[in-house]
Image: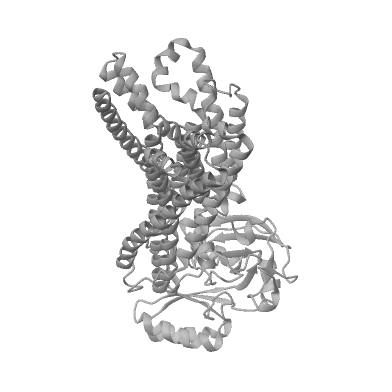
Amino acid sequence: MLKKIFLKLLWERKNDYIRVILSGIFCISVIFFSAAVGSGLVYISVGEKASMTELVMEVEKNFVIPYVLLIFLMILIILSYIRKRAHDYAMLNILGMKKKHRYMYIGCEYLGIILGSIVGGLILGEVESLIVKRFMENIFNDLVDNIFLGVTPIILTLIISIVMFGIGFCFCDQYIACMGIENVTSVGKVSGKNKVNSPWPIIGGVVIFIITLISIVTYWGQIGYTIPATLGMIAMAILILFGGGYYLERLRRKKKKYFKKILWLNNWYHMFYSHVNFSYIVSAFLLIILFGFNIVLVDNLPVSQTENYPYDLVWGANEKDRLFIKKISEKYDVQTELIPCIRVTSGNCAEHIGISAAEYKRLTGENVALKNKEIYIVYQWDRSEYGTIGVDFGKLHPRLYMGCATPNIWVYTQKTLPGNKFTRDYEVKGVTRKIITGNFKTRVLSTSNMNTDVFEDIIVFSDKEYKRISNKAEGSNLTVLMNTPKKHSAVLKKVSEYAEKHSQVNFFDYRGGNLIYDRKQCLIEDRERKMLNVTATLIDMIVLFISVIFILLEKAASDYEILEWKYLFYYRTGMPEKKRKRNMIKEVTAIAKVGLLVSIPVVTTMMFVKIVYKQMSIHWTYIYLVEATVIVMGVTSIIMIIMRFIAGRMFKRSERNSEDE
């Protein structure tokens, strides 16, 4: 009998139950989809199925913050469901159901949520990933015929799903145990009075936001977006929570405005924290989309940037090779330029070209006045590297070793560290950005403990210091720049065969190649890398944007029952239809408006600082700013159009129900 009562009560809440499962399905599908896409991108880049380490370190690390937000979202949804079911659970207790039976039934109820979410999420994610898999196979058809995802995405999804639901239900269990079920039924409510009425927390949020902007132009912003994004989300949390509360309290004192807005704003006073939490999640996702991914997208467009490679062939040769260079130049009509140099290894696992100040002046026409232990660094950066860390993590006194990298100069632990042969004798006098030889990347495997993204930059020494160290440095001492108007393949073959026997081996090349950079091959590798980045970034942005829309729809559906009764009351009191509709639209779109009102100024300022700090040309700065403006306006418009449409549908539904009453 009691079992039938339990099932009947559950059936009456079937819409809420299905909504929770659908929310779980969506969250799991996002996790599986991101893992599957990441696995596909790894397969395209290395030609093998992604291992768990590669998938986590190369792809999923970008989704750590979204996963945390999804956990937070599921906790809110579960608490909202428990709040609606709390009276049903109390009814079972009143009817005398034994505790073990009550726990068994409720346990089965929530086990159904977990299993339904995981199974449904995997199925939906599999369908989504198959669609995108076909899309990627068409884009990268010159690299792979078929993309194999393997089982790693499924395993990773199951692990994250168990962690997500485990954290969610443990939190809810402990919350109920510590605070009581009565507190759960009133979660998000503040008894008609907001608890925050001081401006000081808002000032604290502004201070944290200023720290966020500072972090963008310091080391933490140079190494990535995680720290600035995290600080930005903390600042937004404070501004939404305390700023929203402060505004409502100030509005309450202004009676004329208060009574004018209270018809649609009353739920913000009654369920302040519930509304604020959803607005915050929306703002956090928008920050990740617009700041974390948007700039990366423009960085990688266009996918082919020929200006990064001014020469057809660049070879790290030696002075003894001049005769061979002369012969091949005459035979194939090769235009050559020779740069006397040394190899310089830096402590962040990278090898660079060292030249004298006189040689730098010959190459560029610029005079650099350097004393004995002063150096000048020329960063040969692609536009996407602007604003990142420099040689040896941007230190003023970098750890340098005069000579090419060899196995005996490192200390091997979990990471490869510079040994005692590196010194800090040199001080960076100045830096500049300029492509002289080319934007050449290292070929260290992603799974190596020497993982590095540093490129071959040029380090300029004073003439006196260069003369002192040039005779002692091991490795290539002559950089050869070639333009091959005819028979490029033949020249490349001859140089490669000669270099294999006589030239330095690139320590950081997992293939054991020489210091030979072919413009055509570099452009192909660049195109592949940038297309991978663009594809991954677009997919990430679309997935997170859909998440924003889903969150807003979930909140609107969850609050509909409350809104329906309120607007039924307005209907019966004779409020005009036009006014009821206007209030409904304002109330339904308020969650989105608050999220946008806080996130857009914060994100726009962060993007502006990041773009300006990259110190690009006026042309590219203008392009970045215009693109950022268009994206911000587009995202804002789409969100508001969708929410206004949903509000209109909810109003029509409410009107039909009111007429039926």
The answer to whether residue 280 is seen in the rendering is no
Instruction: Give the quarter of the figure containing the N terminus.
Output: top left
Q: Is residue 104 left or right of residue 369?
A: left
Q: Is residue 575 above or below residue 470?
A: above
Residue at coordinates 49% horizontally, 68% vertically from top-left? 440
Left or right, residue 524 beside residue 468: left
> Looking at the figure, which quarter contains the C terminus?
top left
Report the residue that reaches farthest toward the right: 420
Tell me if residue 318 comes above or below residue 212 in the rendering: below
Q: Examine the image and state in which quarter residue 512 appears.
A: bottom right
Q: Position of residue 65 (x, y in %)?
A: 52, 49
Regarding residue 246, the answer to whether it shows in the image is yes
Q: Position of residue 75 (x, y in %)?
A: 51, 43
Name the residue rendered at 68%, 55% in the picture: 396
From the viewer's side, name the closer residue of 204 and 440: 204
Q: How is the image coloured?
A: one colour
User: Toward the viewer: 457 or 69?
Assistant: 69
Is 570 left, or right, of 414 in this rendering? left
In the image, 657 versus 432, the foreground residue is 657
Percent x, y for residue 266?
Answer: 44, 21
> Of all residues shown, which one is farthest toward the front?
1
The residue most toward the top is 256
Q: From what the image shows, is residue 433 above or below residue 248?
A: below
Image point (43%, 35%), residue name: 596
Q: How many marks?
A: 0
Q: Position of residue 213 (x, y in %)?
A: 56, 41
